């Protein structure tokens, strides 16, 4: 895909994204946890991941478990380059976003799967494992999840990762844990998630997972006064890590602002 074509598709994606967002009230988007990643931020995150790839000939098997209109796939194309991307998978539950991403990107090498990622990855035939995951999972708070849904998510998280998730955790915690269990060993991931888990007791399981089970490369916490999403009243953090146990004496880079 040439730069001109990529820029054209990205311009169309941003326009369609704005149209879809305008159809939903702030309350509905809050319930669904749908807050699209700004393209410039997606590019910065992809560049951070790319800086951790020492083998410049490494083939990228990309995945986004909540792809929306495809901001991260667009950024991946621009940063990694289409020749390095051997495969790309996007999962999306929302029908309108699924149709939008399919129309924009399927002809550019993205395979789209319609459905709930947490069910797809925990089923008997999960998709092929990626080695790069870039994701902005749904910001669905725990009180928007039914008791049955929480119990299902807690069960599969425990089965797939050995982590007992507190019932007050939001949906993004399950996405991160399950996607990490699914992806290739030594693969790289970057997650844009609410920073709340860093400050509360119910975030302890995720903090311990990040400290002990993966090699955390960088944690970038945004200034709470600089909200990344216009109508999402949460502060955000970017977590970049490798799916491997941290080596002895490993230290992580923490940045802010």
Image (cartoon, grey):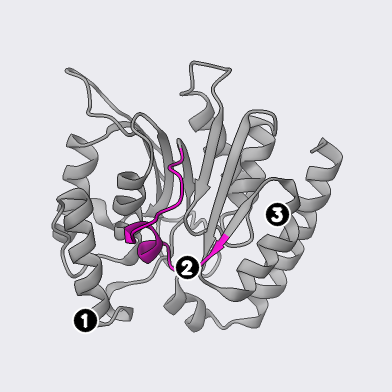
Residue bearing the label numbered 1 = 147
Q: Secondary structure at mark 1?
A: helix
Q: Which residue is mark 2?
A: 232
Of circles 1 and 2, the one toward us is 1
Q: Nearer the viewer, residue 230 or 150?
A: 150
* x and y, in percent, of residue 95 in the image: 59, 75
Q: 141 or 74, which is in the foreground?
A: 74
Residue 123, given in percent of the width and then of the height, sits at: 34, 61
Distance of mark 3 from mark 1, alpha carbons?
A: 36 Å
Residue at 53% across, 41% down: 62
Q: Position of residue 57 (x, y in %)?
A: 58, 18
Instruction: Determine if residue 168 is in view.
Output: yes
What residue appears at the point 27 percent right and 82 percent down from the top-left corner? 146
Q: Nearer the viewer, residue 174 or 48?
A: 174
Question: Horizontal and vertical percent for residue 53?
Answer: 49, 22
Left or right placement of residue 146 versus residue 137 in this view? left
Mark 3 Cα within 10 Å, few/some/many (few <14, many 20+)? some
Name the residue located 30 percent from the left edge and 59 percent from the top edge: 174
Q: Which residues are magenta?
A: 113-130
Element type where label 3 sits in the image: helix
Question: Visible in this render: residue 199?
Answer: no
Residue 120 on the magenta span? yes
The label number, if any, that marks residue 251 in the structure image? none
Q: Residues within 10 Å of mark 1 (few under 14, many from 20)?
A: few
């Amino acid at each position: 895909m040439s730069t001109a074509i990529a820029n054209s598709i990205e311009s169309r994606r941003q326009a369609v994204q704005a149209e879809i967002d305008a159809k939903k009230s702030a309350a509905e988007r809050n319930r669904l946890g749908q807050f699209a990643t700004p393209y410039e931020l997606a590019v910065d995150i992809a560049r951070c991941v790319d800086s951790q790839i020492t083998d410049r000939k490494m083939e990228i098997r990309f995945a986004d478990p909540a792809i929306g209109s495809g901001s991260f796939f667009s950024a991946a194309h621009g940063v990694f380059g289409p020749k390095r991307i051997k495969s790309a998978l996007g999962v999306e539950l929302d029908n309108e976003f699924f149709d939008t991403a399919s129309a924009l990107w399927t002809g550019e090498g993205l395979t789209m799967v319609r459905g709930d990622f947490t069910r797809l990855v925990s089923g008997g035939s999960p998709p092929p494992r990626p080695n790069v995951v870039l994701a902005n999972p749904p910001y669905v708070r725990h009180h928007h999840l039914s008791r049955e849904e929480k119990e299902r998510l807690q069960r599969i998280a425990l089965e797939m990762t050995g982590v007992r998730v507190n019932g007050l955790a939001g949906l993004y915690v399950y996405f991160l844990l399950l996607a990490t269990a699914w992806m290739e060993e030594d693969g790289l991931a970057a997650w844009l998630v609410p920073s709340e888990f860093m400050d509360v007791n119910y975030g302890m399981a995720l903090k311990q997972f990040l400290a002990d089970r993966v090699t955390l490369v960088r944690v970038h916490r945004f200034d709470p006064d600089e909200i990344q999403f216009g109508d999402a009243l949460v502060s955000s953090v970017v977590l970049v890590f490798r799916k491997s146990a941290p080596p002895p004496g490993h230290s992580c880079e923490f940045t802010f602002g």
